[in-house]
Structures are given as structure tokens and as C-alpha cells.
Amino acid sequence: MELFGIIITIIFLIVLVILTNINLENLTDVENAFSTLVMPIQNGLTYLKNKLAGNDAFFIDINNLKEENEELNEKNDQLEASLRELEIIKAENATLREYMKMTEKYSEYNTIPAYIINKDIGNLSSTIVINIGTKDGVNTNMTVISEEGLVGHIISVTETTAKVRTIIDPASTVSATISTSRDGILLRGLLGENQTLKATYIPPETSLIQGDNVETSGMGGIYEKGIHIGTIKEIINTKNITNRYAIIETAVDFDKIETVLVIK
């Protein structure tokens, strides 16, 4: 019984295949009547065959698009990598140009270039860490400067790094000189201030002028003489002239500083 069903199915399929490949317009009236019954089947099979052919093309297009997308993603990754490399090169060039400018400006000193790898600019302390150490010839108490002026001095060193106490650190003191009068003053860091210093021990006969430059005096055994520190921003007079003081605005912006020189 099963064999009979298989044979009938095979014959039916053969008839359908023949019908889908003959021209029904050339048949007789009787045959045309028969074709009326068969035409829907023929159309259906033809549609199905075309549909399957179209789906093949669709899947081929999908595969092509997938390959193209993978290629584009790969090219995009390559472009992003190239862009990152370009940005690094630009940053390195900018750093080198800044080093050259600083070296030319401070040509009278024997200096070592460095860049800042860590900052701790807070209320209680203000220190930075630079990327050079004993292997580069760096030792404690060496002066650190930037293009704008005095940064601080080195307080500890490892083989590859050095820690710098900045002049705005509350524990920092700098012996300085007023540019116009050449009188000596003492500068200290202020708690919670990242851009100002307090000038004390101002001689009574000294005439303070707002905007005057202040530079290192060379006294005290740490800082070289003549390094720019900042300008007089404000003068605070007191009843006792010996207690008066001034606020000095630092030339260095400690929030933005990135590169420095260490004076050997």
C-alpha cells in the first residue's frame, strides 16, 4: 500500500513538472478546459520556482553585505588606530616644542626635561610626581621650573621618578626679591589656595606696588637666583607696618602644568 502511494506521488510530480514546461495556448478546447484546472497549479509552481531563485539571490546579497561590513569595520579600526597614533605624535611634538622653548629660555642652566605623571594639589599639600629619577641624574633639593616660572623643588627620588613640593604647598617657603626695590621677602604657600602665595617679612621702608614682579633671591640653599615666581596681586596693610603682608599671584598655573625642567 505504501509502495502504491509512492508511485502515485511520483507520477503526479512528473505530470506537474511537464505541465510547468509546456505552452498551454496551443492545446485544444478540451485540453484548454483541462488547462483551466491545471493553470493555477502551473502558476503556483512557477511562482515558487522564481521565489526560490530570488531567495537564493537574497541570501547571496546578505552574505556579500556581511563580508563588506566586516571589511568596513576592519578599515574603521585601522583608521581609529592611525588617528590615535597621530594624536600621540602631535602631543609628543607639542611637548618637544615646549621643552625646546623652555631650554632656550633657561639656557644659562643645565636642565633635564620631564613631564608630570601625577598631581596631588589639595588643601593640605601640593605635590607633583615627574617621570625622571636618579638614573637621569636627579637628586633631592633640585629646583623645578616651567616656562612660566618657579614650580618647586624635589623632596624625594626613586630610580625613575621624583616627587616635587610645589611653591603653593603650605609647608613651602621661598626666599624672594621684589623686582623694583630689590628688597627681600619670604613667600609661603596658603591652605586651600592653588594660585597665590603670602609674602611676609616685608621691610618697613619697602614701597610695595601692585603688579610688581617677584623672583627668587638665591638665598636659602635651594632655589637658583632670578627665577620668576609671580606678581604682587594685593597689599594688606596693618596697624603695625612690620606685620603687613602681600598676596602674590603665581606665574605658573598649577592646575594646567604638564611639562617641567629640573635644574641640575
Image (cartoon, grey):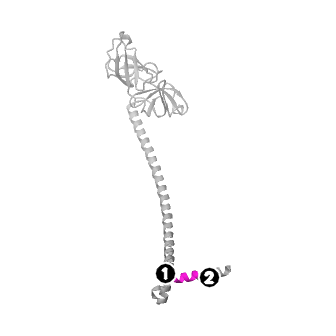
What x and y, as percent, mark residue 8?
Answer: 62, 82
Is the residue 128 above or below the residue 42 in the image? above
Residue name at image x 47 percent, y 61 percent: 68
The magenta segment is: 12-19
Is the residue 149 above or below the residue 65 in the image? above
Look at the numbered disc 1 and give the secondary structure of its residue: helix
Locate residue 206 relative to residue 151 in the image: left or right: left
Q: Earlier in the sequence, mark 1 or mark 2?
A: 2
Look at the numbered disc 2 and give the secondary structure of its residue: helix
Please name whichever residue, 38 or 24, is drawn nearer the observer in this view of the structure.
Answer: 38
Please name whichever residue, 163 or 103, is drawn nearer the observer in this view of the structure.
Answer: 163
Could you say which quadrant of the image residue 246 lies in? top left
Residue name at image x 37 percent, y 20 percent: 247
Asked if the magenta segment contains residue 225, the reply would be no
Q: What amino acid type is highlighted by mark number 1?
A: Met
**Gap in Å between the C-alphas at discs 1 and 2?**
21 Å
Q: What amino acid type is highlighted by mark number 2?
A: Ile
Residue at image mark 1 = 39
Could you say which quadrant of the image residue 17 lies in? bottom right
Is the residue 178 above or below the residue 160 in the image? above
Residue name at image x 47 percent, y 55 percent: 75
Magenta region, main secondary structure: helix
Residue at image mark 2 = 8
What x and y, as percent, mark residue 81?
Answer: 47, 49
Could you say which quadrant of the image residue 198 lies in? top left
Quarter of the N terminus within the rendering: bottom right
Farthest residue to the right: give it. 1
Residue name at image x 51 percent, y 75 percent: 49
Is the residue 105 above or below the residue 47 in the image? above
